[in-house]
Image (tube, rainbow, N blue to C red):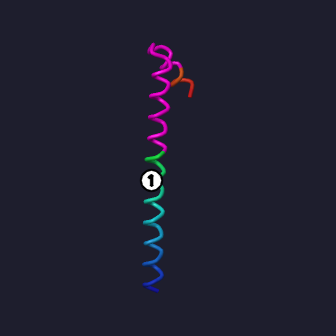
Amino acid sequence: MYAISYQLSAISYQLSAISYQLSAISYQLSANVLRALALMGKSPDFKFSLISQS
C-alpha cells in the first residue's frame, strides 16, 4: 500500500513539473508574440488596441 501511494505521489510530482514547463513555454511564446507586435507597430496606440482585443 505504501509503494502504491509513493508511486502516485511521484506521478503527481512529474505531472506538476510538466505543467510548470508548459506554463513557462506558453509564457515565453506570449512574450515573443508581444515583442513581435511591438516591433510591427511602433506606436503605443496600435499595441494597446491589439492587447485589449485579445
The image quadrant where one finds the C terminus is top right
9, above or below 22, in the image: below
Q: Position of residue 51 (x, y in %)?
A: 51, 25
Which residue lies at the image location 46% right of the left edge and 67% below the top edge? 12
Q: Nearer the viewer, residue 4 or 18?
A: 18
Q: Which residues are magenta?
A: 26-49
* Tally of numbered tags: 1
Which residue lies at the image location 48% right of the left edge and 20% below the top edge? 47
15, above or below 41, in the image: below
Q: Residue pushed farthest right?
A: 53
Q: Position of residue 41 (x, y in %)?
A: 49, 17
Q: Position of residue 37 (x, y in %)?
A: 50, 24
**Amino acid under disc 1:** Gln
Which residue lies at the image location 43% right of the left edge and 72% below the top edge? 10
Q: Position of residue 23 (x, y in %)?
A: 46, 48
23, above or below 9, in the image: above
Residue at image mark 1? 21
